[in-house]
Amino acid sequence: MENILQDKKVLVTGGAGFIGSNLVERLLNQNNKVVCLDNFATGKRKNIEPFLDNPSFVLVEGDIRNREDCDKAVAGCEVVLHQAALGSVPRSINDPKTSNDVNISGFVNVVLAARDAGIKRIVYAASSSTYGDHEALPKVEDVIGKPLSPYAVTKYVNELYADVFSRLYDLEIIGLRYFNVFGMRQDPDGAYAAVIPKFVKSLVNKEAPTINGDGSFSRDFTFIENVVQANQLAAIVDNPKAVNTVYNVAYGERTSLNELISYLKEFLSEYDESIGDVSVNYGPERIGDVPHSLASIDKAKALLGYDPEYSVKEGLRKAIDWYWNSL
């Protein structure tokens, strides 16, 4: 990839998380200095252990809900990649207040800390959940519906704040609406684990994975390397029309949960043939879930030069190799 972020000091909030740690690794490999701000509520220390001895890496153990922690983390940085958040629709339904405090108040703290430190470019993790009950496919950035969960509300409020802050304070803020990201370092454990690592762990353990619904629901599953590319492009783009807006970050194809299970069995069977015989359980649909999700990535292609390198199947092959050697 030609367009890379290099020779900068970059703050990655949530840098010990799944997406954040992949960003940290790539940025360090590209001769950047990286500050990681994380409170380890969902991030894992093991995700950043390989970087702790790197003189270009600094860990600030703190919380984005604490403005002083944000001020400490942004000091001397030139770009902010804001990944810290409490994800998961079910988590937000069970505890909407904490999701609100982290995702909204934390976002405001990070942006204002960046502003006061003289940082203009802020790239933040938005979400495909913002499309809510809008049924048309593919999803296009300027047409959304009503949010279906507290999590979706928080991510939409981030977009509203970003728009207002960019105009009030002369900032360059870019939101990336992630679509079902998967890949290395994604946690398979816990009540709110994402579907792909959860399915992989079940299949590796020869336990029947549970699909919510009949398996016909579909998602635009997006490999982590595509997300890393989008963050870099958003951080360096030098086009006034490309900033202070939001972009879909996806591959642009949808895969049903039944298809997903089929791919996972196929690839895992290369390591253990008996995995292909593991059965699948079907449970009730999950509250707040949308049936189908598919992104138009035309805007990101046109304005950012986004060109996702990995299809779902290509990404799954790479992710499964990592999981097989890590679980």
Image (cartoon, helix red, strand yellow):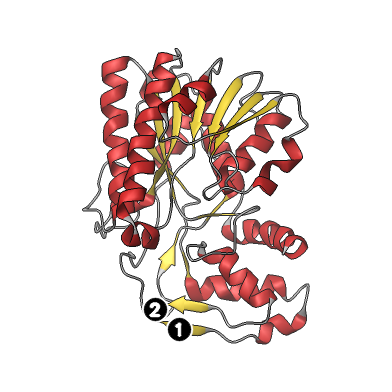
Residue 225: tell me if it is visible. Answer: yes
Query: Residue type at mark 1?
Result: Tyr
In-front residue for pair 125/47? 47
The C terminus appears in which quarter of the rendering? bottom right
The residue under the point 69% across, 70% down is 267
Please identify the quarter of the rendering in which residue 59 is found: top right
Would you say 36 lies left or right of 205 here? left
The residue under the point 60% across, 55% down is 186
Q: Which mark is residue 213?
A: 2
Q: Position of residue 45 (x, y in %)?
A: 66, 46
Q: Which mark is residue 186?
A: none
The residue under the point 63% across, 42% down is 22
- Secondary structure of residue under mark 1: strand
Q: Position of residue 118 (x, y in %)?
A: 44, 12
Residue 105 versus residue 100 in the image, above or below: above
Q: How many marks?
A: 2
Q: Residue furthest left?
A: 146
Q: Which mark is residue 282?
A: 1
Query: Residue type at mark 2?
Result: Gly
